[in-house]
Image (cartoon, coloured by chain):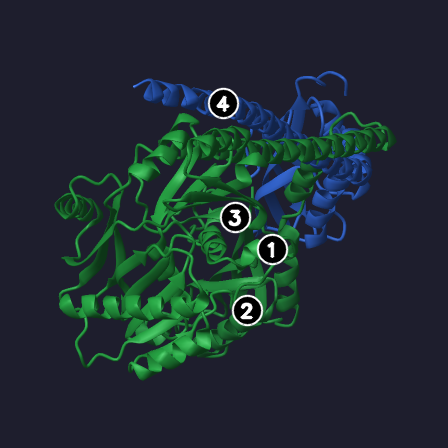
Amino acid sequence: MIARHQKIIIYATYQKLIVSLWHGKQYQSQQTYQNQQVDYAAFRDYLSQHKKATIEVIVDAVEEEYQLEVLPHVAKSARRAMLERKLSQFNRNSVYKTAWLMRQQTSARKEDVFVLLSLTNTGWLQNWIDMLLAEQSLLVGIYALPVLTQCMVQQMKSVAPQLLICEHLASGFRQTYFEHGILRISRLMPIESMPSSSLVDCYLAEIEKMRMYLLSQRIISDATILQVALSHLKADGHMLLTRLAQQGLACINVNWQTGFKKTHSEQTDVCQYPEWQYMRLLNGISQPANLAPVEMTKAYDLTQLTNRIDITALVVLLMGLFISASLYLQGIQQAKQINDLTRQTDTLAQQRTFVINQSPPSPLAGRDLKAVVTMTQMLSEPSPITMMQVISKVLTAMPEVSLSRIRWLQSDLEKIADEENSDFGQQPNREDGRHDRLLQIGFVTVHINQLTDDNQQALAYVNQLVNQLRADSHVSAVDVIQLPVDAQLQTTQGSTSDQLATLPSSVMVKLKITLSQVRKEGL
Amino acid sequence: MNTWINDKHALHRPIIVLAMVVMIICLLIVLTARYKSNQTTMLSNAQADYKLAQEALQLSKQAQQDIKQYLPKYQHLVALGFIGGEHRHEWLARLHQVSTHYQLFTVDYKIGQQAIYHPRLMSNFGQYEMYRSAMTLKWGLLHEEDFIHLLSGLRENTSPFMVRDCEIVTASDALVDSQTMQARLIANCTIDWLTMQDSALKGNF
């Protein structure tokens, strides 16, 4: 698992391979292999020792081809097909070619700007790549050096509209031209070793050639102010800058190491080389435009797929274990609750047994005892005595009124007549006016005595009697069923031969008294 | 081609491992889910048992309280003959006793046939059934208090009864003679003589 984090970054030139080993972001070591038969075996040995390390290759070749393409913005599948078609038109014979999306135009047409890039002569590279494939190395990708230079430029805060970067690398003098931050062309000129003073002339000559080429290709015009960025040049920088200024070119000295933080392992001379800077850059960025065809990176893709499946299995395992553990813990918690409840239930059962044992012996259950006794009390309560007490209290205060008859009954019919019997229904029935409670009803017949004239006085007595009865708290209603008859409203018959007719000395009044219900329950 | 075959073989191991992991995890989840489901069911049962035990304890406490409160009254009812079979001779003897005690005029009575009675709104008496015997009492009153004396005396000395209908009328030819007292009022009452019987305890009273 640790070996998979190992990364080999190869800087390939026509003359040699510079191979650096990285452990994550940490630089480990560097090897150099010349493009000769002796070093091939050593390189294969090196590869066999680092079977599980992923490999990325930076190609610094002379034979490169660039083309800027502005293509319509389309969906992924259509874009892929379009780019394949464009690449085959761009360079049919090259194995190593790619299209790199530089930017998306924000105009209404929404076009994508691509740089098409290919290596035109790769015979020297193929030897090394064949060794990688033979060792089944995990080749991640092959990248052209100008692509990495593009990445460096993208990291710069401000970029001149027309920028020419000049570097003296192991392979030679490389000039890379950027227009508005987009790679347009790169040119490598192998340089033999020569004195520093001659190098200045050589650089100036190559820069002038490059400028003329850009003019001939109409990439720039005579009026274009070309800014030249110099990096890792082996000549006298001050003299070069002066000469360039005399030619009317604006110059800056670029140090790519600015912004990089060195680790302890990187405090070596080798780390000062520009190749190493590019290798370090590649280790820190996501995959740039890959020149390698899919067949070459298949081993790495397969490893990636295997890793993803393994990670999926691990995630499934962990999630499953988490879910299972969660369910199990919930079950354990419930088991604890069950134990607590069982213990509490047993305690309640013991308390119940204690309560039962403490209860006095009884022939019946407490509920039945209560039902029997309550029923008996309910039956015993209603009696005519209350009605008699109410009437007696009123009549005592009215000596003119004498009682002739009382009928007391219980009924669930409020409008029961005196002639009806008191038998009540078994079930209350709202439709026939039956109450769900029994009413105590009294029919009272009284005589009013000592009348002097017509029955106006009798009516006054009746009103007094009714009012006094209604004032009693036990009484809910008093109805007069029969009033004394007014003589003036009746037909009077007779003759003078008869004795003088006399008015009756007493009149009969019949009342219906309904007592208030004091109980909620009924029978 | 060989490389492709090797590639496919290279995927066998992780795929088999993934499949085994999925199967094992599924099995583990099913087992733990079943365990939890069983525990949930058992917990529900335990909660129900606990609730039942609580209710049972509450009922027992209520029953204990009811017994303490109502047992003496029940025993009094048993002594009065309310619980158990109808003992008409005893009842009539007590009617005579009350009549004699309060020096009442003659009480005419008529007792009907006993029948099951289902009072409204309170038809459930547990293991008991209620019976009633319709009874008519007619007696003369010298004073209204004689009426109260008879009903109160019967209430205190006999099993409970329900007064259904009573009529008190003035005797039309009533005279009060200082030598021979005659009734001034006539009372006529219909009452239900009530008893309760338990088939399980029938004959024990």
Q: Which chain is blue?
A: B
Of badges 1 and 4, nearer the viewer stands 1
Nearer the observer: mark 3 or 4; the answer is: 4
Q: Which mark is residue A469?
A: none
Q: Could you confirm whether marks 4 and 2 are on the same chain?
A: no
The numbered disc on residue B17 is 4
The mark nearer the N terminus, 3 or 1, is: 1
Chain shaded green: A
Residue A224 image offset from top left, x and y in percent = 22, 79
Q: Quadrant of the N terminus of chain A?
A: top right
Chain to which mark 3 belongs: A
Q: Which residue is mark 2?
A: A470
In the picture, residue B95 is in which quadrant?
top right
Label 4 neighbourhood size at 10 Å, few (<14), some (14-19), many (20+)? Answer: some
> In the image, are marks 1 and 2 on the same chain?
yes
Q: How far apart are labels 4 and 2 at the CA level?
A: 98 Å
Chain of the residue displaying label 2: A
Looking at the rendered structure, the kind of residue marked 2 is: Arg
In the foreground, A196 or A84: A196
Q: Name the residue that disc number 3 marks.
A: A437
Disc 1 is attached to a residue of which chain? A
Give the amino acid type for the residue marked by disc 1 in the picture: Glu
| Residue A118, percent from left and from top | 24, 48
Which residue is located at x 25 percent, y 43 percent? A121
Q: Position of residue A343 (x, y in %)?
A: 78, 31
Q: Compare residues A448 and A38 and report the one nearer the observer.
A: A38
Give the alpha-carbon distance from disc 3 to disc 4, as whole Å: 81 Å
